[in-house]
Amino acid sequence: MIPIILPEQNLEKRSVSGGYLYVLAWLIIGLMTDYIDEHPIIYSVAMAMLLGFSLSRLWAKLSSGKQTHYDKPGWQRLLIANAIGPALVYGILFAFAMLHIEHHELFIYLFMINIALLSGGTVTYSPNRLLANYYLLAIALPALVVALTRPQERGVEGMMMVLYMFFNLHMIRLLNKEYQERIAQKKSLEELARKDSLTGLFNRRFFDETMHLCWAKHQRRQASLALLILDIDNFKSINDIYGHPVGDEVIRKVAATIGKNFQREIDIIARIGGEEFAVLVQETSFEQTRELAESICRQIADNSIDTDQGPASVTVSIGLAYAQPRQGFDQEDFYKLADDCLYQAKDQGKNQVVAKSI
Ligand SMILES: Nc1nc2c(ncn2[C@@H]2O[C@H](COP(=O)(O)OP(=O)(O)OP(=O)(O)O)[C@@H](O)[C@H]2O)c(=O)[nH]1
């Protein structure tokens, strides 16, 4: 099973320096020991593979520029190959050294490099537990196989590898848990920053940011969009008669009714003031939006809210603006149009929708 790599795991950035280290380490061994003379074919094949992995990674980086392509399966496979491939090369080299090496010094170097790669990979790949585990096994398993088949000569190295492997598997589990907690915290903070705590709807800041983006998008597409501003009628007297907790309950009920009527993900519903809400509606005609607004008005008026002092009837007024972004008519004008409609609805007796399409 191929582990799925998520953008927030940031594996490309985390593994980039290690991705050149293994080539350098092998180059140093080639330059400073007799290994090339003793085993020229093995040295060259290993070098070609390590270089191949490094160059493919360099090519991917240069060709993608600043962008990363986590959504492309080919790109994901390349990243996984760049993790597991060099690990397997070093794992097999060490296993080969365990079987054939007379050169004690080189054996120690390889052992050190593998332990370093084991620990480095644990830290690097820990956000993706499956990939980190595969990486670890790729380095350690070849040595373990040799140790098991030659317990007399290579038992010590085998034991050491098992020890390091289990220690690092444990560390991967811990680091991954910490990483998951951090991501969850970050997500809930982001959620808090854009949500209104009383209703769970978006807050004004998020609404303004989204409206800005939406406006620009519709300007490019030369398409229309709708903005509804809803205000609870005579809300001050609801608070005065029934008390603030009932007032809060009314706000929650109105929010829920709006939410029931605008359920698509692209509908942005926000509480933009004490008893004021806004809805940004995309890809819907003027008539459809007006019908929805009128239906919300009726639903709220028809459903009174139970309180200790008996049922409290609530109504809302709605201003609806429908427009296409264009020269001489900007986002502020759009907002003002919806707001003017709302004031007109209030002036005309409340509990109604005033809609304008321009
Ligand atoms: N319970 C509760 N009341 C709030 C909250 N935020 C604002 N309010 C109250 O909402 C009331 C708004 O009153 P006004 O702006 O006078 O509006 P209104 O009484 O609805 O009058 P119209 O808009 O003309 O129908 C004020 O009394 C605020 O104290 C809140 O979160 N909870």
Image (cartoon, rainbow, N blue to C red):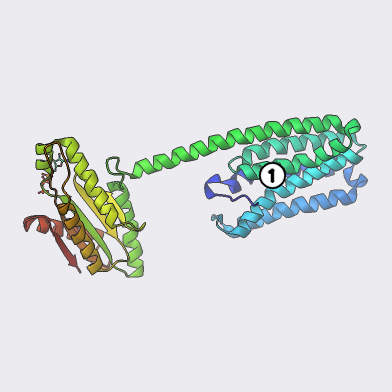
Measuring 20% from the left and 48% from the top, which residue is drawn there? 276
Q: In the image, is 39 to the left or to the right of 177? A: right
The quarter of the picture where the C terminus appears is bottom left
Query: Is residue 272 visible from the viewing direction of this image?
Result: no
In the image, 315 versus 22, the foreground residue is 315
Residue 55 visible here: yes
Q: Is residue 169 above or below residue 206?
A: above
Residue 290, image quadrant:
bottom left
User: Badge 1: few (under 14), some or many (20 or more) residues near its Cα, within 10 Å?
Assistant: some
The percent coordinates of residue 44 (x first, y second) are 84, 51
Q: Is residue 39 left or right of residue 10?
A: right
Classify the position of ligand 1 by quadrant: top left, top right, bottom left or bottom right: top left
Residue 122, picture quadrant: top right
Q: Where is residue 253 shown, x and y percent of the image?
A: 23, 46
Looking at this view, is 72 or 169 the one in front?
A: 169
Residue 326: percent from left, percent from top = 27, 68
Instruction: Give left or right: position of 261 versus 8.
Output: left
Question: As drawn, is 127 to the left or to the right of 51?
Answer: left
Amino acid carrying label 1: it is Tyr
For this rendering, which residue is in front, 246 or 140? 246
- SS for dot 1: helix
Residue at the image position 45 percent from the left and 40 percent from the top: 186
Question: In the picture shown, does residue 185 fall above or below 83?
Answer: above
Q: How many marks?
A: 1
Q: Residue at x 70, y 51 (%)?
A: 54
Instruction: Confirm or reject: label 1 Cβ below 8 Å from ligand 1.
Output: no
According to the picture, the residue beneath numbered tag 1 turns out to be: 134
